C-alpha cells in the first residue's frame, strides 16, 4: 500500500478511537526518513482535531536537587551518578512562589514542581502543601507535582492542598524497566499512579527514549501509556549527562564519542518525530508534551514536532538548559500556531 495512504488510514483509526495494531505501530517507526512529512501530516490531522493549533507551555522547577538514594541509570541526581550538578535540599516558600510567577510570565499554563528522591517525607509534604496553597491564592496557576513514589495518604494530602496533577512517568517498557532501575519496580510506579488517580489528581505519565530500547519496547510502552490513559504524556529524549550509567554506555552520544558501542535506540531528529507521531496516533486526545532532550535531539527539526505534539516545556529541564520563553513563543508563532492562555478563572483577582 502507498505509505501516505497507509498513514492516513492510521489517522482515521486514531480519530475513530481504534487502537493501531502492533504492525501499524512498527510501520510508523519504520517510516523512511524521506516520507516523514506524510507521516507528520497524518499525525497533525489527529492533533488538530482535538487541540487545533494551540501549544500549551509548562515550566519546571527543581525543588530539591540531587541527594537521591535511587539508582535510575539515566538520572544525574541518582545515588550512582557522579555528574557535576547542583545539590540542594527543598527550596524555600519564596523561591517556589517566585518560580510560579516566572511560569505565569512565561505564559505557561502549568507550573511543575519536581523534587528528587524516592518519595516525599512528612515534613517535605507539609512544606509543599503550604506552598501550593499560597501559589493558588497568590498566583493562580495550575500545579503539577512530581515527588516520586506516593502512599494513598500522601496523594490525598496533595489533592487537598490544591495540587491539580501528579507526574510519575512509566519511563520505559515493563521489560526494559528492570534494566534501568534496580531500587524500585515498574509495579511500584503503577501503584503510585493508581493512588494518585484514586485521590482525584489528574495524571501526567510519559516516557524516556534513547535508553537502549528496541522498536518493540517503544511499541509496548506506547500501548501501556494508551491503556493507562493519563491526562498528559511527556516525551523525553535522553540527554545523557557525563557521570551517569547511561552516559558510560554511550547513550545517544555516538556522534561525539564514536568509539562507544551504540545503544540499540540511537536517536536522530527523524526518529524522534516518528516516535511522537506514533504516540499521537495511540493517544489522540492526550496532551502530548515534548520534554527533556527536545533541543538536543530534534535540533533544527524542533518546529516540526509541533505537528504531533501540542505542548512543550520552556526555560529548561531539571539539570539541563533549554529554550527560553521568547524563543519558544517565536517558534510557535513562526509555525502559525498559538500559545494557549491560562484560563482567566484560575487567575486571582
Ligand atoms: S527517583 Fe527521580 S531523582 Fe531519584 S534517581 Fe530516579 S529519576 Fe533521579
Image (cartoon, rainbow, N blue to C red):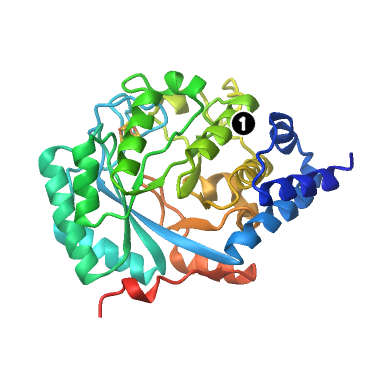
Is residue 331 visible to the viewer in this orientation of the structure? no
Residue under the image location 72 percent in, 49 percent down? 11
Whether residue 344 sits left or right of residue 264 in the image: it is: left
Is residue 345 visible to the viewer in this orientation of the structure? yes
Query: Where in the figure is residue 316, as x and y percent of width and height?
Result: 41, 53
Which residue position holds label 1? Answer: 219
Q: How many marks?
A: 1
Residue under the image location 65 percent in, 53 percent down? 301
Query: Where in the figure is residue 137, as x and y percent of width and height?
Result: 20, 69
Quarter of the picture holding the C terminus: bottom left
Q: Quadrant of residue 260?
A: top right
| Near-viewer residue (184 or 10) | 10
Quarter of the picture holding the N terminus: top right
| Near-viewer residue (194 or 165) | 194
Query: Where in the figure is residue 65, as x and y percent of width and height?
Result: 25, 42
State the residue lying farthest toward the bottom: 349
Location of ligand 1 given as a quarter of the image: top left
Amino acid at each position: 500500500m502507498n505509505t501516505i495512504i497507509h498513514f492516513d488510514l492510521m489517522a482515521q483509526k486514531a480519530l475513530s478511537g481504534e487502537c493501531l495494531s502492533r504492525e501499524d505501530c512498527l510501520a510508523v517507526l519504520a517510516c523512511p526518513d524521506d516520507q516523514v512529512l506524510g507521516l507528520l501530516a497524518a499525525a497533525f490531522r489527529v492533533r488538530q482535531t482535538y487541540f487545533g493549533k494551540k501549544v500549551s507551555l509548562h515550566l519546571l522547577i527543581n525543588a530539591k536537587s540531587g541527594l537521591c538514594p535511587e539508582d535510575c541509570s539515566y538520572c544525574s541526581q541518582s545515588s550512582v551518578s557522579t555528574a557535576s550538578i547542583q545539590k540542594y535540599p527543598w527550596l524555600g516558600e519564596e523561591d517556589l512562589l517566585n518560580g510560579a510567577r516566572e511560569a505565569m510570565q512565561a505564559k505557561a499554563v502549568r507550573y511543575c514542581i519536581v523534587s528528587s528522591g524516592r518519595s516525599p517525607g512528612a515534613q517535605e509534604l507539609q512544606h509543599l502543601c503550604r506552598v501550593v496553597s499560597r501559589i493558588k491564592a497568590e498566583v493562580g496557576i495550575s500545579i503539577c507535582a512530581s515527588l516520586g513514589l506516593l502512599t494513598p495518604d500522601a496523594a490525598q494530602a496533595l489533592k487537598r492542598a490544591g495540587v491539580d496533577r501528579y507526574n510519575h512517568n512509566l519511563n520505559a517498557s515493563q521489560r526494559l524497566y528492570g534494566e534501568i532501575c534496580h531500587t524500585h519496580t515498574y509495579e511500584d510506579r503503577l501503584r503510585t499512579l493508581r493512588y494518585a488517580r484514586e485521590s482525584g489528581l489528574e495524571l501526567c505519565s510519559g516516557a524516556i527514549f534513547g535508553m537502549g530500547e528496541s522498536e518493540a519496547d517503544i511499541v509496548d510502552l506506547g500501548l501501556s501509556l494508551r491503556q493507562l490513559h493519563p491526562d498528559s504524556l511527556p516525551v523525553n529524549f535522553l540527554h545523557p549527562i557525563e557521570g551517569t550509567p547511561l552516559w558510560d554506555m554511550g547513550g545517544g552520544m555516538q556522534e561525539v564519542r564514536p568509539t562507544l558501542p551504540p545503544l540499540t535506540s540511537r536517536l536522530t531528529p527523524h526518529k524522534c518525530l516518528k516516535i511522537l507521531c506514533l504516540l499521537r496516533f495511540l493517544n489522540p486526545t492526550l496532551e502530548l508534551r515534548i520534554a527533556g532532550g527536545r533541543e538536543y535531539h530534534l535540533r533544527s527539526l524542533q518546529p516540526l514536532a509541533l505537528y504531533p505534539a501540542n505542548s512543550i516545556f520552556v526555560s529548561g529541564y531539571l539539570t539541563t538548559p533549554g529554550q527560553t520563553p521568547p524563543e519558544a513563543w517565536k517558534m510557535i508563532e513562526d509555525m502559525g500556531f498559538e500559545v494557549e492562555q491560562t484560563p482567566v478563572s484560575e487567575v486571582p483577582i
